[in-house]
Amino acid sequence: MSRASHWSFTQDDADNISRILMNFLQETNSRSALLVDRSGQLVTTVGEQPQFDATAFATLAAADFSANDQLAKLIGETDFTTLFHQGERDSMYVADVARRLILVVLFDQRTTLGLVRLRLKAAVNDLNAVFTRPQEPQPADFGASHLLAGAEDDIDRLFS
């Protein structure tokens, strides 16, 4: 079952997302933050540019998170909201955002897992607020009918 749904965000939302992620990276001294949708599409990257194919990475991160959701169900959990992968030099922390996106944080020995975990919770809460607030209708949603209403008024004036 896919949790993906159609969603969009405004330029203000994009600016807020970048600000939240940049603040998080500065507070934790982490290297990069990648925001990925549940289908594996890369939404944005903030911080140091990864030295790998970020598009392929996004696809694999989404598949990893999805596989872990299934593992959670097998042991009686609804899901795992965070995952941690530790390497010799580099590590990654992965978190659910608004049940629509996955935040992947890449960090190394310049920071600690504890600090990343502590600050990540606040960053995820801030991101959740961006993605769960009611969306205001965009002019494009009713643009054609609005345009026709204006045209009808002009036509009425012509024939009056």
Image (cartoon, helix red, strand yellow):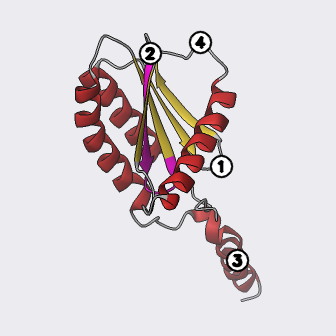
| Measured Cα–Cα span from mark 2 to mark 1 | 25 Å
- In the image, taking residue 74 as reference, residue 145 lies left or right, namely right
Where residue 39 is drawn, which disc sits there? 1
Of the pair 112 and 133, the residue shown nearer to us = 112
Earlier in the chain: of badge 3 and badge 2, it is: 2
Measuring from the top left, give residue 137's x and y in whole percent: 52, 68
Three-letter code for the amino acid on which mark 4 is drawn: Gln
Residue depicted at x 37% and y 47%: 127
Residue depicted at x 66% and y 75%: 150
Three-letter code for the amino acid on which mark 1 is drawn: Ser
Three-letter code for the amino acid on which mark 3 is drawn: Asp
Mark 4 falls on what kind of element?
loop
Three-letter code for the amino acid on which mark 2 is drawn: Asp
* Magenta part of the chain: 91-101
Placement of 63 over or under 4, stated as above or below: above
Res 116 quadrant in image: top left
Decide if residue 9 is in sight here: no
Where residue 90 is drawn, which disc sits there? 2
